[in-house]
Image: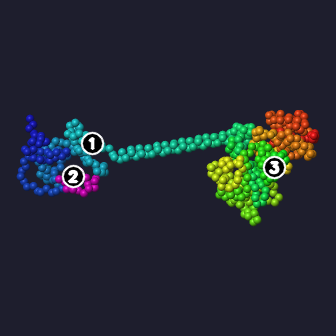
Amino acid sequence: MNDRQDPYDPYAAHEQQLIGYDPYGRPVYGQVPAQPAQPAPPAPQYEQQQYGYDYQGYGQQPRQPQQQYYPQQPAAQDYGQQQYPQAPAHGYETQQTQQVQQTQQQWIPQQTAPEPPAPAERPAAQVPEPRRPDGESEAGRDYRTEMFAFIDQPDEDSEDVIDWLKFTESRTERREEARRRGRNRVVALIVVLALFAVGGLGYLWYAGKLPFLDGPGQKDAAAAVDAGAQKRDMIVVHVHNTKKGGSSSALLVDNVTTKQGATVLLPNALGVTHQDGTATGLGKAVEEGSLGTREALDSVLGTHIGGTWRLDTPFLENLVELVGGIEVDTDTAVPADDAAKAPAVAQGQKQSLSGPMAVAFATHRGEGEPEAKQLERMGKVLHAVLRKVPSDPKAAAVTVESIGQILDPALNAQTLGALLSRLGQHAKGGAYRTDVLAVKPDGTLTDDANKKVVKEVLGGSVAEAQPGAAPRVGLKNATGDEKSQIAAKAALMNGGYTFVDGGKADKTAPATQITYQDDAQRDRAIEVAKTLGLPETVVKKGENAVNAEVVVILGKDYKAS
């Protein structure tokens, strides 16, 4: 029976002596055989470089003094060995060292120590693996793998790389999303612009404002104009020149239906009829102060004028000053008139005019110029004044009252102020027009004036004669004999008709002809024929050459009774 004690038994350590350490750092105890006493030379100190590992070449650290212990021999270990002498430094061994080695070979089990790696193969700062006997299994060891879990710790840099990849991916996605949103916005903008364009073109087509295309709206408007269904408010204004004499007249029209304004300038040569039936020019009637001038204009034009506004030149000056002056595009330069105390007016666009300057320009008529040129200048002044009139009816009424003029009883300051404010809104918005009524030398209206101005702008027609007024009968002389015209005029007036002078025809006609436009006027046309002593066969439906319900074109067959 083997009575050898376990060299690792701690309870037997007091009977044995420490002879060294095993490869795992554990103490080894044993008995050292007795040696003959002889003096041993002192062993020199050697650096451990034969059997131990020298880490100076790997970590570049300075060498430190190591603990003095006896390295194990690669051949065998003796657990009974107590101490080991230092190995000689020059490759030779003493006798005592050889004996110790022989003793260790008898007591220490054989094990093979791993050879240290070559210097070229040693990784920098790497801990060498522990040596263990060949064939020893993991289960027989007194340590476990999880004790060295620090070796498998995850690298912090790998987390940083993952975070960076996530950040890069998210930023790329945000960029792509921003691009998609930008493309969606562009597409939406294009769609909205296309809808606006289509809607605008549709409105222009409906309103008939596209060239070469007539929309339904334009046709409806034209039908309304032809039917005479539009409502208009109008007054006549007479500007009296108190310094040079003479007057100028115009109609101010507010089309309530279409919300448009207009100024129709009336020549002084326009023929009107006094209440006694005598014919005269508009300018002469205004100068005479005829009370029936407004009614006479209604008879000639087929309109319903709401009132008369007499605006003498001093009141016109006050009106221009009250609105703060005006701007007018002047077509000519007006020289100063010391006698009339009229300042000079320069020629050019957007000329600033004071009250006296505005009057000087509105009443100026150059030598040899037709009356229409002077009327156009007055129309510019009236239009510029309307643009400066307050849009508030009450404020406009205060402006009218501040002028200091005496108004027609039929036209008070409130009514005139309300009309001027509405006309001013049309003028400011560009829904305003100015026309000159064209007349022939004899004072009668031209066909062009009847069609465009009287019917379209003024709405004058046979259907809009004043209720209860006597029927209007126009007379155009085509006999070539003035006496025949006088006799026919007297007969019509004695018959209770309102006479409308149609002037002379361009050429004579062999037979008299009586026309009417409205079927409701056929019976009245037959009565007119009987009044003149003409047969019923001369009456027929047709376009009237004079603005009246019934028109008589007197021919050579007419014989005055």
Location of mark 2 (residue): 50
Q: Is label 2 in a helix, a strand or a loop?
A: loop
Report how far apart the C-alphas of labels 2 and 1 lie in the structure: 33 Å
Report how far apart the C-alphas of labels 1 and 3 lie in the structure: 121 Å
Counting from the top left corner in percent of width and height, residue 291 is at: 77, 49
Location of mark 3 (residue): 270
Q: Amino acid at mark 3?
A: Leu
Of mark 2 and mark 3, the one earlier in the sequence is 2
Q: Is label 1 in a helix, a strand or a loop?
A: helix
Of mark 2 and mark 1, the one earlier in the sequence is 2
Of mark 1 and mark 3, the one earlier in the sequence is 1
Report how far apart the C-alphas of labels 2 and 3 lie in the structure: 144 Å
Q: For the residues labelled 2 and 1, say whether their Cβ atoms are less than 8 Å apart.
A: no
Q: Any mark on residue 149, and which?
A: 1
- Residues packed near mark 1 inside 10 Å, few (<14), some (14 to 19) or many (20 plus): few
Magenta residues span 47-67
Residue 58 forms part of the magenta stretch: yes
Q: Is label 3 in a helix, a strand or a loop?
A: loop
- Nearer-the-camera pick, 428 or 525: 525
- Nearer-the-camera pick, 561 or 339: 561
